[in-house]
Amino acid sequence: MTHDELTKLIRTGNEFAGIKYAPDSHTFALRAVVELHKPVELISSSMCLECSSDEETVGYPCPTIQAIEEAVQL
């Protein structure tokens, strides 16, 4: 799932475990986390600027985005 697809899924609402929901404060908080962990394009790959440091580059999707993607695809 791309960052834009994940953002759109969270913004518009979707089904979790077969139950329709409308965006609420939890959804807005989740969207804020996704926005912090957006990809930065490198020459041959993407990295998560939020998770990376001077010592380590963390690829995108980072562990945070991977966990969110797993949760929203239930």
Image (cartoon, grey):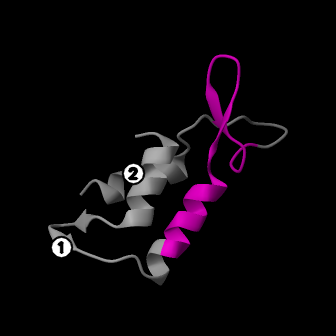
Disc 1 target residue: 19
Task: Residue 18: name its quadrant.
Answer: bottom left
38 in the magenta segment: yes
Q: In which quarter of the image is the N terminus?
A: top left
Quarter that holds the C terminus: bottom left
Task: Please give the name of the residue rendered at 45% of the width and 64% of the height, measured from the top-left corner.
Answer: 11
Q: Residue 69 carries which label?
A: 2
Q: Position of residue 49 (x, y in %)?
A: 72, 44
Residue 61 visible in the snapshot: yes
Q: Distance between the residues labelled 1 and 2?
A: 17 Å
Q: Give the range drawn in magenta.
A: 28-52
Q: Position of residue 45 (x, y in %)?
A: 61, 23
Q: Where is residue 39 in the image (x, y as percent from the top left)?
A: 63, 40
> Which residue sits furthest top?
44
N-term mark: 1 or 2: 1
The amino acid beneath tag 2 is Glu
Q: Give the percent coordinates (x, y) of residue 9.
A: 38, 57
Front residue of this view, candidates 1 and 55 = 1
The circle drawn on residue 7 is: none
Query: Which residue is at the front of the view, 23 or 56?
Result: 23
Is 58 in front, or is 30? 30
Q: What element carries label 2?
A: helix
The residue at 39%/51% (across/down) is: 69
Q: Horizontally, is 11 left or right of 15 in the view?
A: right
Q: Is residue 74 above or below residue 32?
A: above
User: What residue is drawn where x is 64% and y is 17%?
Assistant: 44
Residue 67 visible? The answer is: no
Residue visible at 50% across and 68% down in the picture:
30
Q: Find numbered disc 1 in the image and state the secondary structure of the residue it sits on.
A: strand
Q: Which amino acid does label 1 sit on?
A: Ile
Tell me the quarter of the picture where residue 10 sits: bottom left
